[in-house]
Structure formats: C-alpha cells, structure tokens
Image (spheres, rainbow, N blue to C red):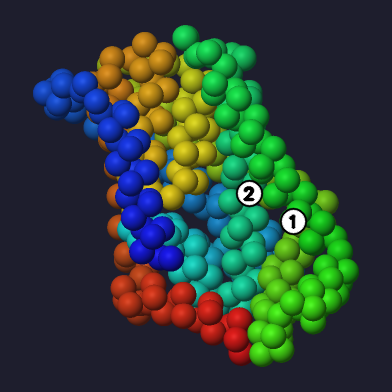
Amino acid sequence: MKRIYFVVGVAISAVFLWLALRGLELNEVWLDLQAANYWWLLPGVAVYFVAVWARTWRWDYMLRPLKQIPLRQLFPVVVIGYMGNNIYPFRAGEVLRSYVLRRREAVPMSASLATVIVERVFDGLVMLVFVFVALPFTPIPGDDGSIRTIVVMASILFFVAMVIFFALAAMPERFFKLAEWLGDKFLPERLQRPLLDFLARFLTGLESLRSFQNVLMIFFTSVIIWLLETVKYWFVMHAFSFEVSFFALMLMNGIVNLATTLPSAPGYVGTFDGPGIAVLTLYGIEQGLATAYTLVLHAALWLPITLLGGYYMLKEGLGWADFNRAVQVAEQEASV
C-alpha cells in the first residue's frame, strides 16, 4: 500500500507540474528569478515562523485534556513534524510528531494523532473560508464557476468530517459501545481488544472538542495561522515585478493548500506549484513570472522549517530511521 500510495503521489505531482509548465519558456523564468529582490524573503520567513508558533499554540489547546505542556517544549516537536512532511512521503511528519511527543512527554501516539487529524480538518475549513471570503472581492477573470463548484464539494466533505469528530467527542461512551458490539459481531477475538484499546486512546485525543471555548480558540488560531501565511505570500510578492490584492493571495493560499491535501511527491511538489501558477495566470500575471514567484515562495516555505527541523532532530538525538520507528510504534500501540 505504501508503494502504491507513493507511485500515485508522484503521478499526481507529475500531472500538476505538466499542466502548470506546458508551453513555458524557461529562459523567462530564469530572467524573473534573476531580477527578484530577495531581501523581501527575510520578513516573509520571520512572519512564517510566527505562524509556526501559532500552530504550536493551537496544538497546545488540543493537547491540554491529555497533558499540559509548555509552548517552548512543544515548539520543537511541531517543527520536527512539519520538516518530516516536507521530506518524507505519506505525511510521515504527522506520525513523527506524535512519536517525538510520546518519547518526550509520554502522551499516547493514538491520542495525539487524533488531535493532528482534527488540525487538518480545521485547516481545510479555514482554507475554504478564505476562498469564500476572497472570491466576491477578487473574482477570477474567465472563471466559469468550476472553482466555486469544487469549493462547495470540498466544503461538504470537510463539514461532514467535522460533524463526525464532534459527534465522537460528544458521545465517546456510546460510540465505544457501538464499536464493541460491531467487534463482537464481525471481528475475530484476537483483533477486538487491540483495536478497541486504540479507539479508546483516539477518542481521548478528541476531548478538546467537548469544550466550546477550546473549539473557538482552535478555529481562531487556525485563522491567525493562515492569515500570517498569506502575509508571507504578500512579502514574497514584493520581491517580483507584479502586484495582486491581498484577497487574491488569500484565494491562492486557500486553493494551493486544499490541493496539497492530495497525495503527492515529498514536499508537495506539483500540488503546491501547479494551482499557484494557475491562479496567478488567471489574474493576468505572465506565466514565467507566476512560475518564478511560486517556485521561490515554495522554497521559502519549505527550506527554513526543514533546516530548523533538522537541527531539532539532531538535538533530540533522532535519525532518519526514526521515521520508520515512529510508524512501528504507532502500530505497536494498537496491539499492546
């Protein structure tokens, strides 16, 4: 399954790159890259790390029912996780983040993985909010309504996922009893207890959704995170010779990050670049310039967090083998 997922991800990345780069004159991209004022990347990177701190703040709210952990201790764990997503397929950084947290704070991986999944759902909802808010202010020239249709369909999927998580958090005992009944009916006895134990820890990880205040803070911090990331888009834009509105960058941010939820090659190659270039060209930005900007933006999002994550990995005494070890521990937790 991992090999199939990897092959599918690489194929999707290749398709997105082909769609974005067909007919592109590479010498035009090179000239635009040479003409860029890269000093604008400095405030962009600084703002991005403020957003990473906000991600840490959000995760703190989700982990509080499990364990109170100071933000300064949680920040390196978050950075290591996002670095893992950048360099390893299957979003293994999410598992690695939970593995490091278990190693440092003895929080069960199944419980912290539940919070990570909820994070992704909130991120998706905020991205959809960005698209809905931005479209009326910056309608895309020539759009035939297909983007709005895609957004509506994605909204339904994310809303259903959110309702399911809220239901699980609100009625864990009932759901657990239902799972026990289904296990008795359809599962061999040797599988029932490990799966039910894993489910119990997973449900514990959803406890933050039982507090209305926590839910508001999770949503609020999610909005702050993605607004700060859009500010980075804005700073990087000033390195190049074009300008679009902040709402247009919100729309680009929303569409790009919704696309990166698809399977892809490591580092979201293609699924980030293709939609970003496409949105800018629809706004009338020349293809070579849109490509140069998107590639630099992608590198500015990828490289700093990856380097800092590598530093924290070395400081933590972790190696590349710990990626696989993290997956093994997660599997073992379900069978203890």
Residue 221 visible, this orientation: no
Residue 227 picture location, percent across and down: 55, 35
Given contact means CB atoms under 8 Å apart, are the residues at marks 2 and 1 in contact?
yes
Q: Position of residue 274 (x, y in %)?
A: 36, 32
Residue beneath disc 1: 165
Quadrant including the N terminus: bottom left
Q: Position of residue 188 (x, y in %)?
A: 69, 85
Look at 59% across and 23% down and name the residue there.
148
**Residue that appears at 41% across and 31% down:** 275
User: How many numbered marks appear?
Assistant: 2
- In percent of the image, x 83 and y 51: which residue is there? 212
Q: Judge from the rendering whether residue 100 lies leftward or rightward of residue 285; answer left or right.
A: right
Of residue 166 and residue 2, the one placed in the foreground of this image is 2
Q: Which residue is mark 2?
A: 121
The three-letter amino acid code for the residue at tag 2 is Val
- The local secondary structure at tag 1 comes to helix
Q: Is residue 111 visible?
A: yes
Q: CA distance from mark 2 to mark 1?
A: 9 Å
